[in-house]
Every structure is written in structure tokens, then in C-alpha cells.
Image (tube, rainbow, N blue to C red):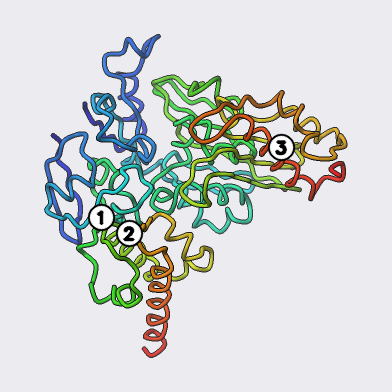
Amino acid sequence: MIEVTFTLNGSPTTVQVDDTERLLDTLRDRLALPGTKEGCGEGECGSCTVYVDGLPANACLIPTFQVKGRGVETVESLDPARLAPLHESGATQCGACTPGVALTALWILDQPELLKTHSLRELMAGNLCRCTGYNGIIEGIRKGLTEQAAREGRD
Amino acid sequence: MAIHQPSTLSEACALLATHNRGSDRDLAPSPLVPIAGGTDLYTHWPQRPDEHAKSYLDLSGIEELRAVRWRNDSLTLGALVTYWRLIQDRTCWSALPMLVQAARQVGAVQIQTRGTWAGNIANASPAADGVPVMMAYDAVVELVSSEGREEIPLADFYQGYKQMRMRPDQLIRSIRIPRRSFLFQRFEKVGSRNAQAITKVGVAIARSGAGWRVVANSVAPTVCRCPTIEALLDDKVTVRGPDDLATALSQDIAPIDDIRSTARYRRRVLARLLYFALRESCSAFE
């Protein structure tokens, strides 16, 4: 066993884990945060997306010992009100990809300057969705960006 | 399994000197496996009990390895520099653009934020996307151990499938890439899709005052330079179509059939990638 101290959803957290444990399993099985899903287990589908020090990463590929001293945020930390544009556009359906999609989508909303160099589809390429065909996801993020820009324009 | 988490490079080297030194790695009691971003090592991790039994040297706490240093004549990447770090570096877009192009084709953002350039070298996959562009730019690998440092051109680093000119007690400390004026540079990758695909065949091409560099991946046991093609370009040999490159290419590559593609497909597609990329800039290409 190994003791790992890190910041989880804004709170200092210390947890005893197996040396071989993945962050995905620590979150789900030890820290009662089952919002982070396991899909492919090989870093392709993005269901297990979390933020590590503010950047999207696949929790299935991260040894828990590596988050020592880092900041980790999961889907449970998101403000549900910010997900409204995704709901309204029917972005996702069955729920397997939803937490990861929500995290990557809100990461983009937090730094729209990424769109100067990247398309939305490139930024979302690490979140596979087998239900909706992606158009609703892209539409939802666009809606969120537009509403956000309008709000900032008013302030 | 034991995890070692040094916070300095000298601590890491001391640990490797204790655990990994010896004439034969197999004789060492429990050699440490270095881990940086973990994106290769941890795929399908629960199904790989053999890997669970090993001991690891976690490099992620060694802050001195995170530096990106631009100088007038070179870029130096510390061993923990990620793909995403360079994608965010606008100097890189203009000075060494193939690094950005290749980085954007490694997995997707979630992999790019974790995976490292040095890890791409040390994982030694023939399908690595970062390695061909670094090799085409004449990158030099800096190795360190408790006995000192050593520099090896990336083009000389691989000796066979997953065989590297690196001892078990050495670590990659940095990668140095010379800055040059390029007359031509192009990275091409062919996979099953535009995103989240491992390369079936790829190539990085650069032309500078140092001459032509043509580096292919997924077509040999290692990422490899194509010296016969480079000589053909330096000599301005007339090329009338992709088939004219086939003989030269067969000297340089040794593709195989595997889960991602076939040897025949790889030969044909590489010849076409080269021909259509070079036709734009070479008058000898008709």
C-alpha cells in the first residue's frame, strides 16, 4: 500500500491505495465518486476523463501514485447549471460518455481561445460517443460558447 | 512491486545505480522501470499482472525535467515535456512545426496532456509519431546516469526492435533539436481514422542546409531514416511517379503484415505519400 495526498475537487485528500492502482479505480472504489466511468481501459474512449492540474486526462492510464501533490477534478465538481446547453441540444444519450464529454466541453468553455488553433471536433476527439453521432455534442458546446460570449458582452 | 518517487534527477540516478546496474539486466534483483506519462505502460493495465509485479521509478515529481528551453540555435525539451506543452507553444508552430503536427495526431487531448516526447523515444515503438519528426530534425538524446552524461543522435539510437543504445541505469534527461532554416518540411500520417489512430504508415520529410531527411514509421522494426531516398533527392534523380521510388524504398524499409496493415499496403502508400509530398518542391519529380 502507498499513501497519496492530493487535492480532490478542491479538498485536500489522503488515501491509502494499492501500488498498482489506477486513479480511475481509486476514485470509484475508495473515494465514492462513481461519476468517472470505465469504457475502453486503453485511453481511447474518454469516459474516464478527469482534470489533472486543470487539463483533461484519462484516469484509466494514471497510476494513483502519480497524482501525489496534484489537483484532480471529477465530473462531480462541475456546476450542473453550466451543462444546460448540452442538455438542450440532446448532446448525449446513454450516459457512458456523458461525464467525459461534460468535462472536456466545459474545459473548452473555460478557454475558448483554444478555438483559435483547434476545431471543436479535434478538441473533442478523445471522447467517443456511440449514441448521438456527435452533432448534438458540437451544437451544445457552440450554444454554450455563444451564450457565454453574450453574457460576457453584457458584463 | 515497489514505487520510488524521487524529486531530483540525482536521486533518480542513484536509485538506478543501485537497482539497475550490472552486466545483464536480468541478473539485477528488481530492476526499476522508469515511468513518465504512463500512457503506453498503463493501457489495459488490470489485464497485465506481469507488469504489476515490477518495481517502478516515477519521474513525474522531478520538476527540473519539465523545462522547455529555446535558444537561438536549438530547442531543448526536458524529459517530462508533454505533447500538449508544445502544442501550446507558438514559437514551436513557426520554428519546428512538424513537432506540433505530430503531437496533434497522438491520441487526443487526454493523451497529449500526459504523454511525453522522451517517453515516445524510450517506448521504442516503430509506430511512434513523435520520433520520426524529431529524427528528421536531427534531434540528439541526452542520457544521464550517476556516472555522467552522454549524447546520442536519435538517428543512431535504435539498434533493432525495442533495442536502444541506452543502459538500464541511464535515463533520458533531455532532447535537443537544432533550429535551422527549412526549405521544405512535411509530416504525413495514415491511420484508420483522423483521430485516435495508431499509424499504419507515416513519414517526416525535412530539407535544410544539412540536406534531405526522410524518416518513416511503422515500416521497419524501428522508426528509420531512408538513406537511399535521401541520396536520390540529393542527387536530383528524375522521378516520374510513385513506382519510381519503390526500388529505392525497398533498400530502406522492411514492412511486415500485422494487426494494423500489410507490408504491401505500407510499401505502396509510403511511395505515394513521398511522391505527392515531394512533387510540390522537387523539380526532378515530374
- Residue at x 23%, y 43% (from the top left corner): A64
**Residue wearing tag 3:** B271
- Locate residue B146: give its quadrant: top left
Nearer to us of marks 3 and 2 is 3
Q: Are marks 2 and 1 in contact (CB under 8 Å)?
A: yes
Q: Amino acid at mark 3?
A: Ala
Are the residues under marks 3 and 1 on the same chain?
no
Up the image or down, B259 lies above or below A41; here it is: above
The circle on residue B45 is none
Q: CA distance from mark 2 to mark 1?
A: 7 Å
Q: Amino acid at mark 2?
A: Gly
* Front residue of A59 and B207: A59
Q: CA distance from mark 3 to mark 2?
A: 42 Å
- Residue at x 57%, y 45% (from the top left corner): B75
Secondary structure beneath label 3: helix
**Residue wearing tag 1:** A71
- Residue at x 24%, y 52% (from the top left corner): A37
